[in-house]
Image (spheres, grey):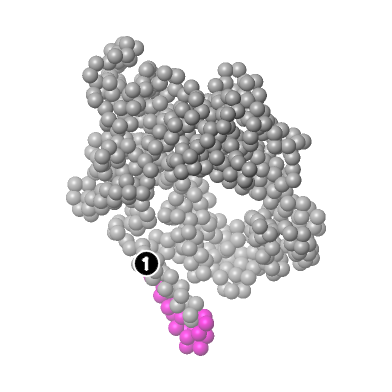
Amino acid sequence: MEIKNEILRRKIGVLPKRPGCYLMKNIDGTIIYVGKAKNLLNRVAQYFLREQLGKVKRMVNEIVDFDIIETDNEKEALLLEINLIQKHYPKYNIMLKDNRMYPFIALKKDRHPYLKIAHNDSSPKEFYYFGPYPNATAARKMIELLNNILPLRKCANLQPKACIYYYMNQCLAPCINKISKEQIKDLQESVQRFLKGDNSEIKQDLTKKMKKASEELNFELAQHYKELIESINHINSNQKIMMQDHIDRDIVGYSTRDGYICILFFNYRNGVLLGKKSFVFEEEPFIDEQITASIIQFYQQNSLPKELVIANESIKDLLQEVLKIKVIVPSRGQKRDLLFLALENARKGLDDHFLTSRLDDDNLKLLEELQEKLNLKKTPLNIELYDNSHTNGESAIGAMVKFINGSKVRQEYRKYTIRGDNTRDDLAMMKEVLQRRFSRIENDNLVYPDLIIVDGGENQIKEAIEVINSFKDCPTSVAGLYKNDRHETEGLIDGKDMSIVFIDKRSPLFFLLMRMQDEVHRFAISSHRNKRSKSFYQDIFSSIKGIGKKRSLMLIEAYPSFNSLCSASKQELMQILPEDAADKLLEIIKEKQNKGFGIQ
């Protein structure tokens, strides 16, 4: 193939044969792809000298210019590539859509150990960490079982009185008793053995207690022990030790078909298969680099194992150097068998995706359709949506959610506590939020969104345009959601001329807009409710003698919603409050309920 673009041809002609990153740009100067190369000349030239297909072909057709950043080695190039992708969110780069982190079980190391769920293992001096677990439910069930079996401390904050767990023999009550170092050490070791898969000793102890209770005709207690033993057996059947060395390792397999690739992670902890995670996207010309980038992104969001098993010898050394863990490519044995199992699951992942999912590429096509309908100068890859929420002017919140390339970017969400006096005025609230948001963009030299969508009609759009026009060279376009008399969304209002753009309710574009609308509404409502709940609680607690700042925080932690507080008994509350304060709180709760609070 011949390179027709003169700028591209000349730039490629002077590329160095060195490692580095390349940044592909479109006609607007927007970075649409970031890649890394061991040899910049060979890699960049291949895009234009080979016949490309699918997503890569569309990308190459958009490229009018590129920049390069040279590095000393391939490792530096890989790290730079990941940072540039996170900074610019190029529309043609792989982005792992699920940034949910697997939960851990954390065991507090201090004098009175207790268990909790953690979403990272960032405090090794304070906690022992076990996992990660496939989901929070699995971790919570494990904690619940251990709390039933062992007399662990249950509360994060010690209370001045013993709680009900002490009287049920499920807690040693460090709040009122002095616990010996030997007891604490035994507890910690029992928890660690259990969570590492060795529960035989605990099973034997429970079996003895069950038999003793049965002999003493205490059949209710015997049944309790029997149920605990059955729970342990259930865990043993679900978590079979697949790897006898008990090492934390991940297995990465992949499969390709019809221009798409599925990359799959098997997560083994202590030799136990805890779960799997797979990602599907369009296949790129340089598959080793695609797999490498996906693995690095995955471990930016999830904990590293001790060992990583992969099938690609060509990327082994680079991954080992960047991740700083052992990376192996097995040629035979059990690990090779597990690689094959990962491959089979990746193939199944592709089958499921083709049968049930809409491909990521659909979002780009839908955004191009949105560009056409709103007659925008460029495809709105970076969209922000705004909404307000308040209750009769109280606890007013402005919310912004961001979608890049048609996908949610939760780390970019923002909520704003309304500072002005007009907390009942939606227009004034919207104006304040937009002014603060765009001032921050200007002051911090951030990227302006391509399009903002507001929830209100023409008046909100006019306020938004007035704010945007006050910022020099701001290219952001404005649209609003158009709703009929029944408050049902039927399309958009174009901010340029206030014309209504109807959108077929059965079309994929309509469903994309509805997902965006639901997300900003959900975020605004939840932010408002959290703020209202704290304010509501503060009003209640401040009026009761005996509830200071510390006890207020403890109550909010124990009862995060008013409905949960309503369900608390006097005995429960007295674990935190003096008796007279508990009585007063229950009296106020009843008054609030009679006025309709807590009824949703």
Q: Nearer the viewer, residue 157 or 12?
A: 12
Name the residue: 38% across, 27% down: 33
Q: Nearer the viewer, residue 356 or 442?
A: 356
Quarter the N terminus occupies: top left
Name the residue: 38% across, 43% down: 358
**Helix, strand or loop under label 1:** helix
Question: In x, y percent, where is residue 343?
Answer: 26, 48
- The answer to whether residue 129 is left or right of residue 594 is left
Question: In x, y percent, where is residue 487?
Answer: 62, 44
Question: In x, y percent, where is residue 415?
Answer: 62, 39
- The answer to whether residue 292 is left or right of residue 458 is left
Q: Main secondary structure of the magenta part?
A: helix
Quarter the C terminus occupies: bottom right
Name the residue: 52% across, 59% down: 115
Q: Residue furthest left?
A: 332
Question: In x, y percent, where is residue 118?
Answer: 51, 52
* In the rendered image, the vertical position of residue 76 relative to residue 520, given as above or below: above
In the image, is residue 539 part of the stretch drawn in magenta? no
For the image, the number of numbered tags is 1
The answer to whether one can see residue 512 in this image is no
**Can you tell which quarter of the image residue 208 is in?**
bottom left
- The answer to whether residue 189 is left or right of residue 18 is right
In magenta, the rendered stretch is: 200-221
Q: Residues within 10 Å of mark 1 (few under 14, many from 20)?
A: some
**Can you tell which quarter of the image residue 91 is in?**
top left
**Can you tell which quarter of the image residue 467 is in?**
top right
Q: Which residue is mark 1?
A: 236
Q: Nearer the viewer, residue 109 or 594?
A: 594
Name the residue: 58% across, 44% down: 488
The answer to whether one can see residue 558 in this image is yes
